[in-house]
Image: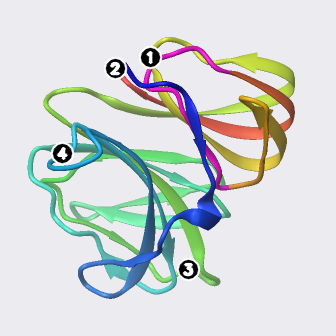
Amino acid sequence: MTIPHTVSIGDIPVSAWANGRGETVELARRPTTGPFVWRLSMATISEAAAFSPLPGVARVLLAVDGPLTLTIDGETHELARHGTASFSGDQDAAASAPVAPQRDLNLMVRGGGVPSLEVVTVDGRVATTPDVVAVVVLEGEVTALGQRLVPGDTVVTAGEAAALRGRGVVAFTAVR
């Protein structure tokens, strides 16, 4: 059993993409070592870039900062701020060059689970549901587990209940 805990985005090392055309921080994953069952990361896209192929991995991506244009198997997807796109790691996917660097939130799942990213407004108090594995603060001031969280900070719940308080916008990440 995982005890809910917070992860400060400022404490996570930044890694370059395998193709060197973007950066990412791994916010949470299970298990914590070896091949993941689920992995949550936040990437920065600064230029047009193909995504690494991930056969057998289901993905959902959320545009954090602003509009983001993806091409998935030749089809263009225009994501508004906080918009999402779901696709398979088997598909040919790429991001177009943004006007300014853009961050995206990416949940990847192996083994037949379906990843879900749901944007939730916190205005007072909100509790997680049992299928939520992590919550990422997107904007505003939110507290959880007695800690003040800033955008990018994550509450890893792994299915245990967690309450968030304050005013802001968060992403509930779930595996269904």
Q: Main secondary structure of the magenta part?
A: loop
The reply to whether discs 2 and 4 touch (Cβ–Cβ < 8 Å) is: no
Q: Earlier in the sequence, mark 4 or mark 3?
A: 4
Q: Earlier in the sequence, mark 1 or mark 2?
A: 1
Q: Which residue is mark 1?
A: 131
The percent coordinates of residue 94 (x first, y second) are 32, 71
Q: Earlier in the sequence, mark 2 or mark 3?
A: 3
Q: CA distance from mark 2 to mark 3?
A: 31 Å
Q: Which residue is mark 4?
A: 57
Camera-nearest residue between 50 and 164 = 164
Camera-nearest residue between 93 and 124 = 124
Kind of element beneath mark 3:
loop
Kind of element beneath mark 4:
strand
Q: Which residue is mark 3?
A: 98
Left or right for 15, reference 130: left
- Residue 67 in view (yes/no): no
Q: Nearer the viewer, mark 1 or mark 4?
A: 1
Q: Nearer the viewer, mark 1 or mark 3?
A: 1
Q: Which quarter shows the N terminus?
A: top left
The scheme the figure's colours follow is rainbow
* Residue 161 within the segment the image draws in magenta: yes
Q: CA distance from mark 1 to mark 3?
A: 33 Å
Q: Which residue is mark 2?
A: 176
Looking at the image, residue 11 lies above or below residue 34: below
- Alpha-carbon neighbours of circle 2 within 10 Å: few (<14), some, or many (≥20)? few
Q: CA distance from mark 4 to mark 3?
A: 25 Å
- Residue 104 in view (yes/no): yes
Residue located 76% across and 40% down the image: 169
Q: Amino acid at mark 3?
A: Pro
Kind of element beneath mark 1:
loop
The reply to whether discs 1 and 3 touch (Cβ–Cβ < 8 Å) is: no
